[in-house]
Image: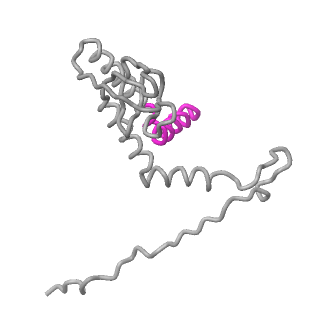
Amino acid sequence: MNKAISYTILVFFLFNSIGYYLLFEVDKYLVRKEMRLTILENRADMIVLRVKNADSNRDLQRSDKREIEYKGMLYDVLREVRQGSSTVFICFHDSKEESLFKGLNKAHFHKIYLALWDHVIKVAFPEQPVNVNNTTFSDLLFPEVFISVKSLVLPPWSPPPKLV
């Protein structure tokens, strides 16, 4: 029974710290599936991009064979044709996946998230490797954490009322 409670608490803590990534992957799968259906039904507007020197162009990044990022915008590539030194991409703008990645970046750099990882990495682990066989608790070196504690007792704003 105690192990079940421990595992349940562990799952809650892990989901709190990495659960967003799990939900992100599910959302990414759903958005890509929706985009494939949109492409198959010809409901999206095709865009033709002509990129010079696509292999060395800094504005162009390939996510995989069927996805590119060009000047900060995501595109799903339908066809790619080389014409001399330039490459022509026939593609669709993927705004939903773009907003999904922006949300991930916003959540990833949130102050609470960064503080949690800072606490887990710097405070919870010892500074030096520990030899498990010959170590006592007094041999472990943890970083010192200084927290200023301020009084929570507030002075009264005015004297209390008197009974007449």
**Magenta segment boundaries in residue numbering:** 1-22
Name the colour scheme. one colour
Q: Nearer the viewer, residue 137 or 102?
A: 102
Q: Quadrant of the N terminus?
A: top right
**Farthest residue toward the left?**
164
Left or right, residue 55 beside residue 28: right
> Residue at image x 47%, y 30%?
62
Q: Quadrant of residue 72?
A: top left
The answer to whether 14 is drawn above or below residue 137 in the figure is above
Residue 114, percent from left and from top: 49, 52
Q: Position of residue 68 (x, y in %)?
A: 42, 29
Q: Is residue 19 magenta?
A: yes
Q: Nearer the viewer, residue 23 or 54?
A: 54
Q: Residue furthest right?
A: 134
* Residue shown at the point (28%, 25%) measured from the top left: 47
Quarter of the picture holding the C terminus: bottom left
Asked if residue 123 is positioned above or below residue 104 in the image, the reply reads below
Q: Is residue 157 above or below residue 100?
A: below
Q: Is residue 127 magenta?
A: no
Horizontal side of 128 relative to 82 (left or right) equals: right
Q: Position of residue 38 (x, y in %)?
A: 27, 17
Number of disc labels: 0
Seen as rendered, the residue at the extreme top is: 40
Q: Position of residue 67 (x, y in %)?
A: 42, 25
Q: Residue at x 75, y 56 (%)?
A: 140
Main SS category, magenta section: helix
